[in-house]
């Protein structure tokens, strides 16, 4: 009988101690003494009975969230927030109904969600993109848990996925490891697709569609490229980026007048894009002088457009020789084409003689225009030192070619002295 009495007494004392422990936890929490509250809840959950009490775990979630929150900007790791999340999940498994009520009324997990997200943002702004992405992944785990239990948030967390995708893209850009690059690119694609497939169209999300379109064109996935570039054009009609990428697809069909019209459309949207203009001029040059396509009227229009685009390029980038040498080459090639026509005419009648004389004047005019462009380029080339020319082979070759072209122009015009001068100068460039 005494043994039974003492056993019952022991149980009552133990139960009283358990009750007192949870009261200590509540008291410390109410007093906002987070250090004591953390110590109390840790002690409470360390014993078997406390570990089975949903309320203890729920309080641990609340207390650890406050501990993490007090660390503020000094907390660049997830530990207190993650332990808070794990505690809330444990409480939920022990008592679904009670925890559901508290979650709906008080929404304590929202603070965990934003706590992890803010740590991710701090890491992102510090350019620690690996840690940032890890925190964003953890944030998403909390967010999905809240949403799936119908306690709040949204099905699609667009801002979180924007930062997650961008952090992954930056990790890929900064890495030299091909495995890491591939893995992070796929991470970016995963997050950005979630946004794009819902057709989110806020201005800050344009990078999502640009990244997807660029990724798929680089990786030769034509179907996906068309899908996301078309989405980009639909949601951001005034942005020329998607049209620029689409030019590469259009060029697969061949260089044509239709392609030129697409270039014109892009230039209307973005008139200050040097590269689209120089590429447009280059494609027209190939069509006119290599492919030799189109009617005479179309060729005249394209010739004028080449001049317009290259002159615009020179205004956009005055120190670049490419527009000047290409313009000189265009005049020179036009003169060569005229020369072929000149040679085909037999001056057997006054009319034919006049026609031939007129063509000769046109040829001379084109060559003089070519000289103007080449000599403008020459002024830029001559600013390079011998050491720079030695290192920059492409610039050195362009310099030599320009001198040679000048020699050819003057030779045709009958100025043998200048033709010889430029030829000798070309030979000195090593």
Image: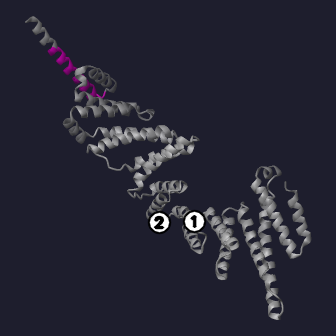
Instruction: Farthest residue to the top: give it.
Output: 2
Label 1: few (<14), some (14–19) or many (≥20) C-alpha neighbours in 10 Å: few
| Quarter of image, res 310 | bottom right
Local SS, label 2: loop
Q: Which residues are magenta?
A: 11-32
Q: CA distance from mark 2 to mark 1?
A: 24 Å
| In this view, 85 is above or below 207 | above
Foreground: disc 2 or disc 1 = 1
Colour setting: one colour
Q: Nearer the viewer, residue 334 or 241?
A: 334
- Residue beneath the point at 57% across and 63% down: 248
Residue in the image at 35% along x and 50% along y: 156
Closest to the observer, 121 or 291? 291
Q: Which residue is mark 1?
A: 252
* Quadrant placement of the N terminus: top left
Residue identifier under label 2: 237
Is residue 285 rendered magenta in the image? no
Q: Is residue 426 left or right of residue 18?
A: right
| Label disc, if present, on residue 229 of the rendered structure | none
Which x, y percent locates residue 186?
47, 47
Relative side of 225 to 34, left or right: right
The image shows residue 142 at horizontal and vertical percentages of 34, 40
Vertical position of residue 238 compared to residue 132: above or below: below
Q: Farthest residue to the left: give it.
A: 1
Q: Nearer the viewer, residue 13 or 421?
A: 421
- Across the whole image, how many numbered discs are drawn on residues? 2
The percent position of residue 408, horizontal first and vertical second, equals 84, 70
Q: Is residue 28 left or right of residue 292?
A: left
Quadrant holding the C terminus: bottom right
Residue found at x 51% / y 62%: 242
């Amino acid at each position: 009988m005494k043994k039974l009495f003492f056993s019952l007494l022991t149980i009552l004392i133990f139960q009283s101690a358990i009750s007192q422990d949870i009261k200590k936890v509540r008291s410390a929490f109410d007093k906002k003494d987070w250090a004591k509250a953390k110590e109390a809840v840790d002690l409470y959950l360390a014993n078997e009975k406390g570990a089975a009490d949903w309320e203890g775990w729920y309080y641990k979630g609340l207390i650890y969230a406050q501990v993490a929150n007090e660390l503020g900007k000094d907390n660049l790791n997830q530990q207190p927030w993650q332990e808070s999340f794990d505690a809330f999940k444990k409480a939920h498994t022990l008592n679904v109904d009670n925890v559901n009520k508290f979650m709906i009324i008080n929404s304590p997990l929202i603070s965990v969600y934003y706590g992890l997200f803010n740590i991710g943002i701090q890491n992102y702004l510090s350019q620690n993109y690996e840690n940032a992405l890890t925190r964003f992944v953890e944030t998403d785990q909390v967010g999905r848990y809240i949403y799936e239990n119908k306690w709040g948030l949204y099905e699609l967390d667009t801002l979180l996925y924007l930062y997650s995708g961008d952090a992954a893209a930056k990790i890929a850009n900064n890495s030299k490891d091909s495995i890491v690059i591939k893995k992070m690119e796929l991470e970016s694609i995963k997050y950005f697709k979630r946004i794009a497939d819902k057709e989110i169209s806020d201005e800050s999300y344009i990078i999502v569609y640009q990244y997807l379109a660029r990724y798929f064109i680089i990786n030769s996935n034509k179907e996906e490229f068309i899908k996301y570039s078309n989405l980009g054009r639909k949601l951001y009609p005034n942005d020329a980026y998607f049209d620029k990428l689409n030019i590469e697809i259009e060029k697969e069909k061949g260089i044509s007048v239709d392609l030129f019209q697409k270039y014109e459309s892009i230039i209307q949207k973005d008139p200050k894009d040097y590269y689209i203009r120089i590429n447009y001029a280059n494609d027209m040059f190939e069509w006119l002088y290599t492919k030799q396509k189109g009617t005479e009227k179309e060729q005249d229009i394209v010739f004028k457009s080449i001049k317009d685009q290259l002159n615009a390029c020179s205004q956009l980038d005055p120190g670049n020789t490419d527009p000047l040498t290409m313009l000189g080459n265009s005049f020179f090639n036009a003169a060569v084409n005229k020369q072929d026509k000149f040679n085909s005419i037999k001056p057997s009648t006054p009319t034919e003689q006049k026609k031939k004389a007129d063509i000769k004047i046109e040829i001379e005019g084109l060559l003089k225009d070519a000289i103007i462009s080449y000599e403008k380029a020459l002024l830029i080339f001559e600013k390079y030192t011998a050491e720079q020319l030695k290192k920059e082979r492409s610039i050195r070759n362009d310099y030599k070619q320009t001198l040679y072209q000048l020699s050819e122009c003057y030779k045709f015009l009958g100025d043998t002295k200048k033709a010889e001068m430029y030829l000798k100068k070309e030979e000195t460039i090593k």
